[in-house]
Amino acid sequence: MSKIEHNMSLTPEAATKLSTRQKLASGIGLIGLFILVLAIANVNFPNKPLFLSLSLGLIALGTVIFANDLYLGKHAGIKNDGVWFKSLSGRGFWAWVLGIVLTLFYVVLYWFPQYLGLNADGQNTGIISLFDPLSKLISGNPASQWFVYGTLYTLAILAFGYKFILKYRNNRYEVIRTFSVMFFQLGFAFLIPEILIRLNQPYYNPANIWPLNYDLFTDYKINEFLSAGNVGVIMLVFGLISIFVITPILTYKYGKRWYCSWVCGCGGLAETAGDPYRQLSDKSQHAWKIERWVIHSVLVFVTVMTIAVLYSFLGDSANDFWLTKDAFLWGTAGFLTLLFAVIMIFKRKELAKDAKYGAIGYLVVILSIICINYFSGNGNIFFFGGYQLREWYGFLIGAAFSGVIGVGFYPIFGSRVWCRYGCPMAAILGMQQRLFSRFRITTNGGQCISCGNCSTYCEMGIDVRAYAQKGENIVRSSCVGCGICSAVCPRGVLKLENDDMEGRINSEEVLLGNDVNLMDLVNQKSK
């Protein structure tokens, strides 16, 4: 048993030191990483399959050995381990170095792939050529920068997922949830799309749902689906069913956690590789206000962009296709108006004042732009061409926000920056969760000792302790149901539940009723 486990000091020096085995594991992982660095530097390895296997294998092996030594020598259960006093997890020097390196990697990956060795007109070089054998084995094609990224992304979720499972091995929910994100990343996000390419089918990730998959309704993607015959049509229909049927039903039953914490690759990376940085999320009310406006503005942006892209794809004559530009445009306007009306009539009490004003403002803006452009005869529905909007969205949100900022800033701002402020899928699921989901986190205020573990380790920036102290249920739209707040609570105050809609949000009457029932019980016992 490690002596560190029995050290009760808040700032023990030993907590920041690596054991001999951990140093050895770090060295093994760094050797594997160094092979990739050499490949970026255009070192031409004679046996690429061997060196690629060696590189990825050493990275995985080093992570496994490090995790085994870090957690298997201690009792199961969540421990602080001096997380705020380590340079890498406490915004120290090495955290900034890692953040800069990750940010630069994403910048090169998205906009300068030629520096990674991508050669669309010839043979790849650099690190991309190192992945050519694996890419040809799975898809039959040479590697691209996205294949390299997908491979490393999957490796990170698998390797750090193993570390995460060891850390939270005392919690069955966390173990199963982590296996789920590992499975969906490896199978649905990585292997299935590549195998489809090998079978001459469209590239399709069934776990990537609109609006996260913002290219789903572009003309080239729709034409790709239709030209693929029945298989392509099934993919397109499944994409539509995922939006309008699967997503609302599963969110109603389980909350947004079914996707954000069990399926999504972005969430999977945040939970596994980003776990050491979850305490860095800003818990202030100011950050929460910014979060609400920014993420819903991104949702409006992707909705506007999708409408514009589809409008430009459709024709004017019903003889060509039953869904014409006019029918689509006014059908969309009618659907958004109806959806807004239903929410305001039946769910307005669950919306804060600023949320109501924001919803009204967004709806008025969208409908006004549609009407102005339509009646003016401008073919560009939102003043700009649909594909120009798509390019802007892809650059600002799809690349800069989700990749460069979303992952590159893990060591500085926490692991869920993208999920909190930018993900339009999280925004939609959050609204559904807030308005009609059965999911909630119940609290027992009488047992809370105000230790603050729950708030500290909430990666979504929710001040969980404030709810726990008052005994209020947590139904925040931003909550991804990761369950870490419950896992780190030393008193069992928090519990994740899927129950009926009654009592989701505490009221004075409910709390008073509980007090009255308790007093009746005491009086009966005294008699």
Image: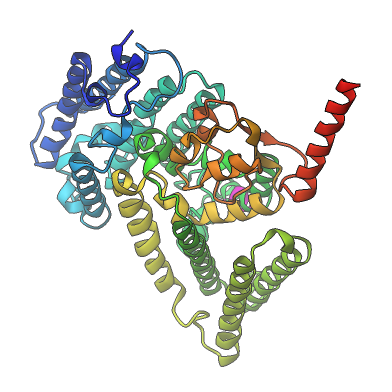
**Magenta residues, dominant SS class:** helix
In the rendered structure, the answer to whether residue 246 lies left or right of residue 218 reads right
Outermost residue toward the front in this view: 526
The image quadrant that residue 252 belongs to is top right
Vertical order, 522 against 284 (above or below): above
Q: Position of residue 229 (x, y in %)?
A: 56, 49
The image quadrant that residue 492 belongs to is top right
Count of numbered marks: 0
- Determine the residue positioned at 53% across, 67% down: 300
Vertical order, 334 against 145 (above or below): below
Image quarter in which the N terminus is found? top left
Q: Position of residue 360 (x, y in %)?
A: 63, 74
In the rendered structure, the answer to whether residue 158 lies left or right of residue 116 reads right
- Residue 432 shows in the view: yes
In the rendered structure, the answer to whether residue 267 lies left or right of residue 19 reads right
Outermost residue toward the right in this view: 527
- Residue 206 shows in the view: no
Residue 239 included in the magenta stretch of the image: yes
- Determine the residue positioned at 50% across, 33% down: 484
Residue nearest the viewer, comparing 144 with 164: 164
Vertical order, 478 against 278 (above or below): below
Q: Position of residue 214 (x, y in %)?
A: 48, 58
Q: Which residues are magenta?
A: 236-240
Q: Position of residue 344 (x, y in %)?
A: 73, 67
Residue 344 included in the magenta stretch of the image: no
Q: How is the image coloured?
A: rainbow
Vertical order, 430 against 192 (above or below): below
- Determine the residue positioned at 83% across, 38% down: 516
